[in-house]
Amino acid sequence: MKTGITLAALLLTATIASAQAAAPSPSPAAQTSAPAGNADAGKKLYSSFGCYQCHGYEAQGSSATGPRLGPKPIAWAAFSRYVRRPTNQMPPYTEKVVSDADLANIYAFLQARTAPAPVANIPLLK
Ligand code: HEC
């Protein structure tokens, strides 16, 4: 009987702890619109943090290693959330590793990529 109560208390504590862990942090990453970033600085960071290894130097992506990220990355809020807490194969980059300012620069670099030519304009694909 006593064990049952102790177990219930433990479960309750664990539930509260996980609910607190899931609470949103009041960081700039929670903003909906992207903070102003510098694309040139972002280019260097995109390279030094190794994003290019999976997403390609031009953020063009690859079906084998990581999706296309530019020139239209997903909305800033979802972008920063995913980079901090990816849910699949991508490794996480916490605020300690990539600051919000660095991430904003990377985001600006991604937005500055040129869009691929429409398929209709590529003779080989006609
Ligand atoms: C080891 C490979 C790898 C590295 C390094 C990597 N990514 Fe990814 N990324 C992935 C993969 C694979 C996905 C697809 C979802 C998944 O499996 O997590 C992804 C998904 C994403 C997404 C979500 C895209 C979408 O449309 O939902 C974003 C944003 C992203 N990566 C940004 C970055 C940034 C920025 C960096 C560098 C700081 C980076 N990634 C480094 C492999 C990587």
Image: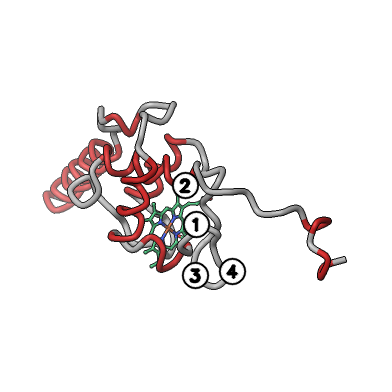
Q: Which residue is mark 1?
A: 59
Q: Is mark 1 within 8 Å of ligand 1?
A: no
Kindly report which numbered mark, 4 or 1, lies closer to the viewer in this rendering: 1
Query: Where does the image place residue 84, in percent across and percent down from the top left?
Result: 32, 48
Looking at the rendered structure, the secondary structure element under dot 3 is: loop
Dot 3 or dot 2, earlier in sequence = 3
Which marked residue is nearer to the observer: mark 2 or mark 4? 2
- The image shows residue 61 at horizontal and vertical percentages of 54, 62
Residue 16's label in the rendered image is none
Gap between marks 4 and 3, in whole Å? 6 Å
Could you say which quadrant of the image residue 20 lies in? top left
Give neighbour class at mark 1: few <14, some 14-19, many 20+ (Cα, 10 Å). Answer: many
Residue at the disc numbered 2: 110
Asked if marks 4 and 1 touch (Cβ < 8 Å), the reply is no
- Tag 2 secondary structure: helix
> CA–CA distance between discs 4 and 1?
12 Å
* Residue 69 position (above or below residue 111): below
Sequence order check: which comes first, mark 1 or mark 3? 1
Task: Tell me the residue that label 3 is attached to.
Answer: 65
The residue positioned 42% from the left and 55% from the top of the image is 87
Foreground of the two, 33 or 114: 114
The amino acid type of the residue labelled 2 equals Leu
Q: Nearer the viewer, mark 3 or mark 2?
A: 2
Compared to residue 19, the image places residue 93 above or below, namely: below
Q: Circle 4 sits on which residue? A: 63
- The number of numbered discs placed on residues in the rendered structure image is 4
Circle nearer the N terminus (2, 4): 4
The kind of residue on which mark 4 rests is: Ser
The answer to whether mark 3 is within 8 Å of ligand 1 is yes
